[in-house]
Amino acid sequence: MSTRSAMTSGTGPLSPPAFPTMTDAYVAVLRHVHAHHHERLVDVGHPCWEARDTSFRVTAPQHRLVLLRARRANIAFNIAETLWYLAGRADSHMICHYAPRLAKLADADGMLTGTAYGPPLFRPRPADGRSQFDQVIDLIRQDPATKRAALVIMRPDEVADPANPDVSCTLALHLMLRAGRLHMTTYMRGNDALIGLLGDAYAFTVIQEHAAVLLGADVGDYTHHAGSMHINVPDIPRSTAIIDEAVRLPPPRFDMEPMTASSAARLGTVLSWEEALRTNTAALTSSEAAALPVDGFWRQALAVLEAYRQIRHTDRRVDAATIALMGPAHHWLMAARWPHRVPEHLPAAGARP
Ligand code: 5HM
């Protein structure tokens, strides 16, 4: 690539490798940690395989789902965690409905600190009622070429107490609007390549797409840097199985429903439905879903949460109407995670498996 075209595209020999989908990037990161790690055996915490300074780029971050059967991703949790962030929440009550393991990080009041990215990103600040996210969106509106649109997460005081079990792993999310495309770069101090990376990339790319829609921009690249990318030693066999699957079976590829409209009111509708489904005070029927004032992206997300409601609160198989509503990619993931509750996704005749 010539110097000029490298400058135009923003990529060059020192840029991270680029992948079309998050599934491709995820497998590449696992392989990288397997091939280039140092074994870190510690007295406290988890012994792990660690690859320092790992970076990658996804050029179509709408393809944020990791479609690998052996990973058995919990997409209901990924959606709920993203909503938990967008709502600015820190309570374990909501998030532990989807991931009970997080309860061990909660403080005496049932609050999460480092893991809860909602308060630093989306909670309105007393000074002017705007969140850090609102401020950054306004900054880009005023100065589209700005290099200052960084959303800072980890705070210095989090490491004051060495015994704090919950210190933010993400340092900052950085938005850059260039040539009509909104790019996001994530900086992490530490990232679990098998467990944490999948949900982190999901939530951050949804935030990226949400910001792009608010700014009337196209979604650009998603780039991710982690100082310590690692796999805990007990998880090595599982990561090996995932890498093996990716070699044997090409992952499926689905068209993704784009986000087309974002506003506080639409998000409010999604959040109140999440609560109703979590508490089993309502069920989302097809006719109700069709009437919701939200776009196709959030309608599919709510259908996943309706399926999760059926899994948690009934003993029946998830109904066909809900499966149709959630779209094929979510159906594929839910069937991989809950094969006894969700019928297998069968590709349409003539489609790529
Ligand atoms: O000792 P330390 O604070 O780094 O342990 C937390 C670990 O949780 C991280 O090293 C990383 O493996 C994982 N993690 C992650 O991958 C945690 C968070 C929560 O901030 C995250 N991704 N978002």
Image (spheres, helix red, strand yellow):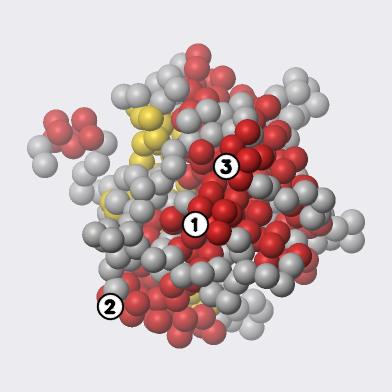
- Relative to 27, 173 lies left or right: right
Label 1 beta carbon within 8 A of ligand 1: no
- Relative to 159, 324 lies left or right: left
Q: Secondary structure at mark 3?
A: helix
Which is in the foreground here, disc 2 or disc 1? 1
Q: Earlier in the sequence, mark 1 or mark 3?
A: 3
In this view, 131 is above or below 89: above
Q: CA distance from mark 3 to mark 2?
A: 33 Å
Q: Is residue 112 visible?
A: no
Which of the image's four quarters has the C terminus?
bottom left
Q: Nearer the viewer, residue 311 or 202?
A: 311
Q: Report the residue marked by disc 1.
A: 330
Q: Report the residue marked by disc 2.
A: 248
In this view, 215 is above or below 229: above
Amino acid at pointer 2: Arg
Q: Nearer the viewer, residue 90 or 209?
A: 209
Q: CA distance from mark 2 to mark 1?
A: 22 Å
Identify which residue is drawn at 54% across, 75% down. Answer: 339
Percent across and percent down for residue 16 are 30, 52
Identify which residue is drawn at 39% across, 56% down. Answer: 22
Q: Report the residue marked by disc 3.
A: 299
Crowd class of label 3 (few under 14; some 14 to 19; many from 20; radius 10 Å): many
Amino acid at pointer 3: Arg
Q: Residue furthest left?
A: 2
Q: Secondary structure at mark 1?
A: helix
